[in-house]
Image: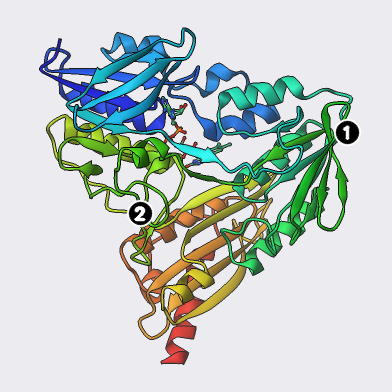
Amino acid sequence: MGNERLVVIGGDAAGMSAASQARRRRGADDLEIVVVERGRWSSYSACGIPYLVSGAVDGFDALIARSPEEHRKRGIDLRMGVEAEGIDRDRREITVRDLASGRTDRIGFDHLVLAMGAVPIRPPLPGIDAPGVHGVQNLEDARVLIDYLRPDQRRAVVIGGGYIGVEMAEALIRHGLEVTVVDRSAQPMSTLDPDMGALVHEAMEGMGIDVVTETEVVAIEVVDGRASAVLTADGRYPADVVVLGLGVRPNTALARDAGLPLGASGGLSTDLRMRVTADGIWAGGDCVEVLDLVSGRRRHVALGTHANKHGRVIGTNIGGDYATFPGVVGTAVSKVCDLEIGRTGLREKDAAASGFEFVTATIESTGRAGYYPGARSMTVKMIAERITGRVLGVQIVGRDGAAKRIDTAAVALTHRMTAEDMTSLDLGYAPPFSPVWDPILVAARKAAQKVAEGR
Ligand SMILES: Cc1cc2nc3c(=O)[nH]c(=O)nc-3n(C[C@H](O)[C@H](O)[C@H](O)COP(=O)(O)OP(=O)(O)OC[C@H]3O[C@@H](n4cnc5c(N)ncnc54)[C@H](O)[C@@H]3O)c2cc1C
């Protein structure tokens, strides 16, 4: 039994990374680690769900990074099917319930890690709980959806055109369904500016996906006890299956009830070391808010890439070393069929809301030399601060290696580079990989020119 006990609530990306890092640094005789996870899976990749549903990834096991047994072998007391119900900060213990037996218990802690993830948004619409309406938040949701899909089903409606919505549209197309995506925004992928979202819209229509924008879902029509159509303010969209992709909010009810500090975004507030309180309460992943390094504001960004890093930082600190999570620039990539989407930094409306004056530059280029077989086009948009030329945001929509080009821009944003700085970046070139001027460099050149003209 250890001298100290670490208790983790939530056994996925943030929670298990924290537990594993702490275990690497402190042996079981020094630190006892207990993780409570209410679900059936731990350390799974929700990011893989669209590809599991599409069939591109074969079987649930492929999405499990480490099983509960493997964690236990490494000295982590992982308790599955156990839900945390309360946090008593004065007594330094949590209340838990075993979901199978209903038995409640208390577990004392020296360190407590809150890694409860996010809650999918599920508006209280008539029919929303009918069979045939599916969330895709976790592996159990994916299992229920996959079991529900039948060869005789013809139509699917995806509510929400964010990255999960468009990835699920692809998954359902691959099942041979006719897919409609319904979104209240002007364009799908509202994490992009509308002009870039319009390119996604057009491409999706070209793939045979019906995209209906600027419309509000008012109800799910239910016939014979199953979802049969999605009703919007403007029309009726028949559906044998409905998938919800409406985004998430931080899962902080437990923390709020315990009086822990929440930020304006609703996520838990932490310091740079991911501490919520100085006396051993930590938090990471989808339940926290993070500093946006471009705007200087705090935001809730629910991404696995951050959750893993937060967990690592927490585990390193609890393990007795020093680590910080400085913040994010807002980088994300996704795809729908062969169309790739990348974004980082601020959209025009974010830049304006933050008080920046800026210029924008949009260019079209190809992912490899124009003469090289298979060259396909991509559009790159760059937003740069007027006068200083600091790059504030980049968005890319296109094919053939478009999405991961955003990483170059993410590095530039992290290091507050100007568009002019970016024009001379020593990026790799050979005809199969890029034109001699990479699309990122072409966009930087145009943005730098606009900045210079505006001085
Ligand atoms: C379909 C889909 C696709 C995605 N694709 C990507 C992608 O491509 N790239 C990317 O970066 N991110 C992606 N994400 C987001 C990513 O999966 C999440 O950001 C990440 O899983 C967050 O990790 P987390 O540990 O904070 O929370 P979660 O993974 O949600 O884990 C939280 C865990 O806590 C448990 N829990 C909650 N409350 C309690 C309680 N009271 N007691 C006990 N256990 C509790 C839950 O059961 C859950 O297992 C995707 C998400 C989805 C749903």
Left or right: 353 as drawn, with respect to 272: right
Can the viewer see residue 435? no
Left or right: 46 as drawn, with respect to 321: right
Left or right: 145 as drawn, with respect to 1: right
Label 2 near ligand 1 (CB < 8 Å): no
Q: Quadrant of residue 115?
A: top left
Pick the quarter of the image with the C terminus. bottom left
Disc 1 residue crowd, few under 14, some 14–19, many 20+, Cα 10 Å:
some
Residue that mark 1 sits on: 154
On the image, the x and y values in percent for residue 398 come to 64, 57
Label 1 near ligand 1 (CB < 8 Å): no
On the image, the x and y values in percent for residue 285 come to 38, 40
Left or right: 102 as drawn, with respect to 232: left
Can the viewer see residue 8? yes
> Residue flagged by tag 1: what amino acid is it?
Arg
On the image, the x and y values in percent for residue 231 come to 82, 48
Query: Regarding mark 1 in the picture, which secondary structure is present there?
Result: loop
Relative to the observer, which residue lies in front, 440 or 35? 35
Disc 2 residue crowd, few under 14, some 14–19, many 20+, Cα 10 Å:
some
On the image, the x and y values in percent for residue 69 come to 39, 9
Q: Earlier in the sequence, mark 1 or mark 2?
A: 1
Relative to the observer, which residue lies in front, 169 or 444? 169
Image vertical order of residue 164 relative to residue 149, above or below: below
Relative to the observer, which residue lies in front, 281 or 127? 127
> Residue flagged by tag 2: what amino acid is it?
Gly
Count of marks, rendered view: 2
* Residue at left offset 48%, top offset 56%: 406
* Residue at left offset 87%, top offset 54%: 235
Q: CA distance from mark 1 to mark 2?
A: 44 Å
* Residue at left offset 76%, top offset 34%: 174
Numbered tag placed on residue 263 in the rendering: 2
- What's the coloring here? rainbow
